[in-house]
């Protein structure tokens, strides 16, 4: 399959079915709100390293968590019962995305560039992002953020400075999304950690049907 080159003056994307088997669909464009919202509404997302051209991805097999199916281990149930953490939503988006960046830069490197931070902070101001903050003793110790369109949540990144903080963020977010009748959390790519919390693979055709339903 070819990889498409985007025109900065055209916000449309090629059909996600045309993506390479790796999931790579297109290169170029920008991270304007209009382009990002168009991309996510079609199951497409940006992911690239500092200094690279913007890469747009659309994996054929999607890894999702259904909010009602979130798995909570016995140990996490004990943590939650002890009320170790204070959980908020959309209380400090800017600090959450920056913390995700800094934690990853220190460990394995990050795709969250200055441009990425600016773009997603802008989406948050427009009402299309959600953050979950986890505090312990009044200090931000974990959290996650992602894009929210229709009844879909597209997870972008999470961080944890304290044991179990990111797990708590995901558990409480899933419960909040369940209450609001969200259909799925799109994890984008597989990890053992997300599988342990209820993540499952969904084929492209099923994913497209759910995506269409969420956007109606």
Image (cartoon, rainbow, N blue to C red):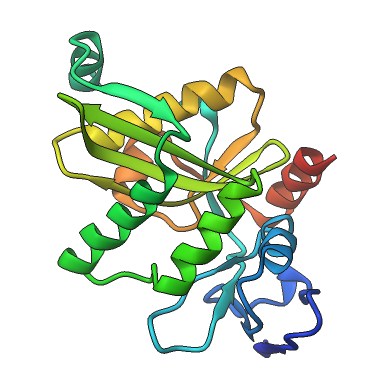
* Residue occupying image coordinates x 52% and y 88%: 53
Give x and y (percent) for residue 106. Answer: 16, 66
Left/right placement of residue 211 relative to residue 110 reads right
Left/right placement of residue 169 relative to residue 142 reads right
**Residue at the extreme right:** 216
Give x and y (percent) for residue 15. Answer: 78, 72
Q: Quadrant of the C terminus?
A: top right
* Residue occupying image coordinates x 66% and y 82%: 29
* Residue occupying image coordinates x 22% and y 58%: 103
Quadrant in which residue 168 is drawn? top left
In the depicted structure, whether residue 209 falls above or below residue 174: below
* Residue occupying image coordinates x 23% and y 68%: 105
Task: Count the labels in the image.
Answer: 0
* Res 17 seen here: yes
- Closer to the camera, 18 or 115? 115
In the depicted structure, whether residue 48 falls above or below residue 176: below
Give x and y (percent) for residue 110. Answer: 31, 69
Quadrant in which residue 148 is drawn? top right
Left/right placement of residue 16 relative to residue 119 reads right
Quadrant in which residue 183 is drawn? top right
* Res 68 seen here: no
Give x and y (percent) for residue 44. Answer: 64, 64
In the depicted structure, whether residue 48 falls above or below residue 59: below
In the depicted structure, whether residue 161 falls above or below residue 38: above
- Closer to the camera, 93 or 82? 93
Q: Quadrant of the N terminus?
A: bottom right
Left/right placement of residue 197 relative to residue 145 reads left
């Amino acid at each position: 399959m070819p990889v498409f080159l985007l025109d900065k003056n055209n916000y449309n994307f090629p059909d996600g079915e045309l993506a390479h088997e790796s999931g790579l669909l297109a290169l170029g464009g920008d991270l304007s709100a209009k382009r990002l919202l168009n991309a996510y509404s079609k199951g497409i997302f940006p992911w690239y390293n500092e200094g690279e051209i913007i890469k747009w991805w659309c994996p054929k097999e999607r890894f999702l968590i259904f909010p009602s199916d979130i798995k909570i281990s016995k140990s996490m149930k004990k943590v939650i019962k002890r009320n170790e953490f204070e959980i908020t939503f959309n209380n400090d988006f800017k600090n959450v995305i920056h913390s995700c960046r800094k934690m990853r830069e220190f460990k394995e490197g990050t795709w969250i560039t200055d441009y990425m931070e600016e773009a997603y902070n802008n989406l948050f101001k427009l009402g299309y992002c959600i953050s979950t903050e986890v505090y312990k003793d009044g200090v931000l110790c974990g959290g996650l953020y992602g894009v929210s369109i229709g009844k879909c949540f597209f997870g972008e990144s999470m961080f944890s400075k304290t044991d179990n903080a990111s797990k708590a963020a995901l558990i409480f977010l899933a419960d909040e999304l369940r209450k609001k009748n969200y259909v799925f959390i799109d994890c984008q790519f597989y990890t053992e950690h997300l599988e342990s919390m209820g993540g499952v693979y969904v084929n492209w055709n099923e994913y497209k049907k759910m995506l269409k339903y969420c956007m109606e």
